[in-house]
């Protein structure tokens, strides 16, 4: 996986709950379909650091989950209970 940009790292950290002390490790992030974060999430998905969880989408919010490779890219390791794999 190529190195993540600052914006990509911040979105990944936000999804892992590392950017807010009140947030738990939930391994996913919601981004608005027309917002600026959707482009960042799509780039992360292309790099294999996240994947879209279409079944969890609600309204215009798109849900992306962090892969173990994405967590590793920001220096974290997902606990086994929080590891979510993309279904093919």
Image (spheres, rainbow, N blue to C red):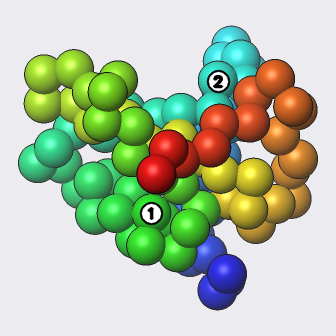
Residue 45: mark = 1
Asked if 47 appears above or below 19 in the picture, the reply is: below
Asked if 76 appears above or below 57 in the picture, the reply is: below
Asked if 2 appears above or below 47 in the picture, the reply is: below
The residue singled out by tag 2 in the image is 26
Q: Residues within 10 Å of mark 1 (few under 14, many from 20)?
A: some
Is 55 in front, or is 2? 55
For marks 1 and 2 on the same chain, the one whose residue lies earlier in the sequence: 2
Q: Quadrant of residue 1?
A: bottom right
Residue 55: mark = none
Q: Quadrant of residue 21?
A: top right
Task: Please report the residue visible at 62 percent of the width from the left and 43 percent of the height from the top.
Answer: 85
For the residue labelled by badge 2, is the local secondary structure a helix, a strand or a loop? loop
Position of 39 with respect to 8 (left or right) is: left
Which x, y percent locates residue 34?
Answer: 11, 48
Q: Residue furthest top?
A: 22
Task: Please report the residue visible at 87 percent of the width from the left and 31 percent of the height from the top.
Answer: 80
Which x, y percent locates residue 54?
Answer: 30, 36
Asked if 83 appears above or below 36 in the picture, the reply is: above
Is 45 in front, or is 23? 45
For the residue labelled by badge 1, is the local secondary structure a helix, a strand or a loop? helix
Q: Quadrant of residue 78?
A: top right
Viewer can see residue 19: no
Q: Mark 1 and mark 2: span between their CA atoms? A: 18 Å
Which x, y percent locates residue 74?
Answer: 77, 60
Q: How many callouts does the rendering have?
A: 2
Viewer can see residue 25: yes
Task: Please report the residue visible at 64 percent of the width from the left and 86 percent of the height from the top.
Answer: 2
Position of 50 with respect to 31 (left or right) is: right
């Amino acid at each position: 996986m190529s190195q993540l940009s600052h914006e990509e790292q911040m979105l990944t950290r936000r999804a892992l709950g590392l950017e807010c002390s009140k947030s738990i490790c939930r391994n996913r992030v919601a981004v608005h379909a027309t917002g600026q974060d959707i482009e960042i999430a799509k780039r992360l998905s292309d790099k294999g650091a996240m994947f879209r969880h279409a079944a969890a989408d609600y309204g215009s919010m798109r849900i992306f989950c962090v892969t173990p490779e994405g967590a590793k890219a920001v220096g974290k390791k997902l606990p086994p209970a929080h590891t979510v794999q993309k279904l093919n």
